[in-house]
Amino acid sequence: MSSDHTACRYCGKYLSDIFSVSAPEHAEAIAHVKQCNLYKKGQVIFQEGAHPYGIYCINTGKVKLSHSGDEGRDQIIRLVKPGDLIGYKALISNEPYTATATVLEDSAVCFIPRDVFLQVLQKDTALSLRMMQILTSELRRAETKITHLAQKPVRERLAETLLTLKETYGLEEDEQTINVTLSREEIANLVGTATESAIRLLSEFKKEKVIDLPGKKIRILRLQQLIKMANLQD
């Protein structure tokens, strides 16, 4: 990990909708103390069970949040993209991290110290409201995932997971290939099934010409069919 003290006004993702609502003086207070760290693929940003000393904003790259489950098996609970905050739940609740943040590809991550962030949060009504909206949205996603795990077949969950990856990370220049590389085990983890089942279903999707599997990449060939297979409902 290496550090960079680039001012926030030069940070590509600082003016995301999270901090763009802050008053100028509060944004300046954050810019004055924040530090941008560069992480290599596979490095850990923070560890489950550790005490939070601040929050992190993803500038570039991709990160996964995973929780250690039974028998030491990790469960991916969230995928993070540029502009997202991580570590805020533990910080606000003053409790240890409930997940480990691991870098999926080389990433630039800004760190904002606990005291400064909480001081700004107490003073800045707009930022406080935005944080409540983020927490509420994450709770709603968690409730939806629990419902789908209980009620939807694995095939539908896999289709929905591929669509979620597309929405989170977008597509490469060919406008078909999902712009993230995950192992089959990580995909199975997101779906909530065994790795063998995920591999088998991915092969079925390929045989049906809904997707292609060049290496570890996933290329969506028939988007509308994938949406239909996911059985998404408003």
Image (tube, rainbow, N blue to C red):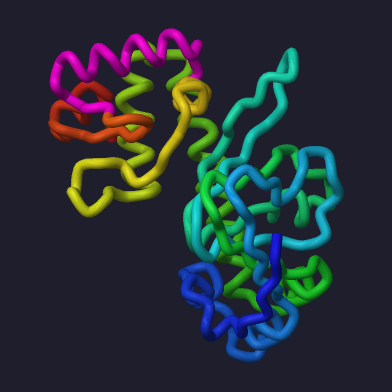
Is residue 163 or residue 119 the one in the foreground?
A: 163
60 up-or-down from 215: above or below: below
Stretch of the chain drawn in magenta: 192-213
State the residue at coordinates (77%, 55%). Answer: 91
Task: Report the side of 169 relative to 105 (left or right).
Answer: left
163 up-or-down from 62: above or below: above
Specify the quadrant that holds the C terminus: top left
Q: Position of residue 27 (x, y in %)?
A: 62, 83
Q: Position of residue 105 (x, y in %)?
A: 52, 49
State the residue at coordinates (33%, 29%). Answer: 160
Q: Position of residue 141 (x, y in %)?
A: 49, 38
61 up-or-down from 177: above or below: below
Is residue 116 or residue 71 the one in the foreground?
A: 71
Task: Report the side of 4 relative to 185 (left or right).
Answer: right
Task: Report the side of 108 relative to 232 (left or right).
Answer: right
Location of residue 122 (image quadrant): bottom right
Specify the quadrant that holds the N terminus: bottom right
29 up-or-down from 60: above or below: below
Location of residue 159 (image quadrant): top left
State the residue at coordinates (43%, 21%). Answer: 148
State the residue at coordinates (80%, 66%). Answer: 114
Report if residue 219 lies within the magenta region: no
Q: Position of residue 118 (x, y in %)?
A: 77, 69
Question: Which residue, as the protein is rendered here, is positioned at the far bottom?
Answer: 25
Report if residue 210 lies within the magenta region: yes
